[in-house]
Image (tube, helix red, strand yellow):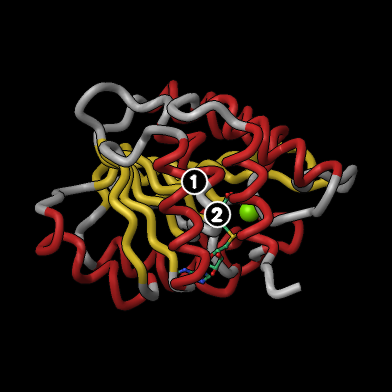
Amino acid sequence: TGTTRPIRILQFVQRCAKHGDALSVISAIDSFCSKVEWAMNVGDKKGEILDAIVLETRPRWVLELGTYCGYSTVRIARLLPPGARLVTIEMNPHYAQVAKEVIQHAGLEAQVELLVGSSSILIPQLKKKLDIEKFDLVFIDHWKISYLPDTKLLEECGLLRAGSVLLADNVVCPGAPDYLHYVRNSPQYQSQYYQSYLEYLQVEDGLEKSIFLG
Ligand code: SAM
Ligand code: MG
């Protein structure tokens, strides 16, 4: 019928979530995706782990790789301390347009910079584009083959400091074995697995938190 899953998610948010209320946007997406149509959001279960890590890290600058409809963007942005910013990168312009409206519905557009393009092109431009020094937290959730090359690119571009936290989603399902091998074996990282469930399903998945040691 000419609509897309992201558009159906957006329409549900606009119909069911309160404007300016991030938590109601998150709950609307979770209920739509658990009851009506599955979608690749980090979801409610892993979302709680993501929330806890945002709160303990108290980041000034956050980078998100893979925005999709803006679910995790809203989850992270609502917990940021005053003055902090979230830069989120999405290469699909249709998804990015939906995310922009979801973020606005949550009232979080002032905290979020949404960049449309491929991470491998945009990461090297971030310092010039945004006057940013280092990221305190990076949420990695785009295509799994890009986790490792983009991590190495963040290192090369000087966007990580000692203590920066990388948080990677879907390290079990669908999995990112080369990335896991790297962060678990490199002396430059201290890495830890957080077991949980794949979004909206009873299938094991988890997040890997890796502290860059410099
Ligand atoms: N983080 C979102 C959430 O939890 O709500 C879900 C992101 S979804 C799993 C992955 C997204 O990454 C897709 O929308 C895809 O278009 C985007 N993507 C994949 N590879 C990318 C790349 N190299 N650069 C930018 N975006 C990319
Ligand atoms: Mg994911």
Q: Nearer the viewer, residue 116 or 191?
A: 116
Disc 2, disc 1: CB below 8 Å?
A: yes
The quadrant where residue 79 appears: top left
Task: Name the residue at 35% across, 27% down.
Answer: 80
**Which kind of residue does numbered mark 1 sit on?**
Val
Q: State the quadrant of the N terminus.
A: bottom right
Q: Specify whether residue 139 is in view.
A: yes
Asked if ligand 1 lies within 8 A of label 2, the reply is: yes
Write down the residue under mark 2.
Answer: 69
Task: Name the residue at 45% across, 50% down.
Answer: 101
CA separation in Å, label 2 and label 1: 7 Å
Mark 1 closeness class: few <14, some 14–19, many ≥20 residues within 10 Å: many
Give the number of the disc on residue 102. 1
Q: Nearer the viewer, residue 11 or 126?
A: 11
Please state if 163 lies on the left or on the right of 141 as rendered: left
Secondary element under disc 1, as helix, strand or loop, is: helix
